[in-house]
Image (tube, helix red, strand yellow):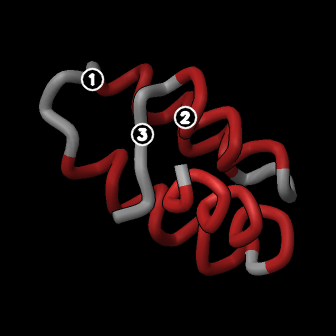
Amino acid sequence: MIKFIVEVLMAIFLHPLAYILCIINIVNRTDMSGLSKVLWIIITFFWGIGPILYILLGGGKFW
């Protein structure tokens, strides 16, 4: 639970760092197709809400 709170706060206040961590995680995932990887990279670009959506709906993580 604490990890989730830290990730949400990082997504809101330190978006560039959260975006880079999301991209690293998305590129290294083997369970996603190429199209879904591109879509998640585009979605996580949006400030604050993008990385949070990736954590909640995409099954992702920052670390």
- What kind of residue is marked 2? Trp
Residue at the spot x=73%, y=63% of the render? 11
Crowding at dot 2, Cα within 10 Å, few <14 / some 14-19 / many 20+, comes out as many
Residue at the spot x=69%, y=71% of the render? 10
- What kind of residue is marked 1? Met
Question: Closest to the observer: 16 or 11?
Answer: 11
Q: Residue 19 appears at what percent x and percent y?
A: 60, 64
Crowding at dot 3, Cα within 10 Å, few <14 / some 14-19 / many 20+, comes out as some
| C-beta proximity under 8 Å, tags 3 and 2 | yes
Residue 49 sits in which quadrant? top right
- What kind of residue is marked 3? Gly
Q: Residue 56 appears at what percent x and percent y?
A: 59, 29
**Which marked residue is nearer to the observer: mark 3 or mark 2?**
3
Q: Above or below — where is 31 with respect to 26? A: above
Gap between marks 1 and 3 measured at Cα:
11 Å
Question: Closest to the observer: 5 or 26?
Answer: 5
Q: Secondary structure at mark 2?
A: helix
Disc 3 or 2, which lies upstream in sequence? 2
Q: Residue 26 appears at what percent x and percent y?
A: 36, 46
Residue bearing the label numbered 3? 60
Residue bearing the label numbered 2? 40
Residue at the spot x=51%, y=71% of the render? 20
Gap between marks 3 and 2 measured at Cα:
10 Å
Residue bearing the label numbered 1? 32
Q: Secondary structure at mark 1?
A: loop
Q: Above or below — where is 15 with respect to 62? A: below
| C-beta proximity under 8 Å, tags 2 and 1 | yes
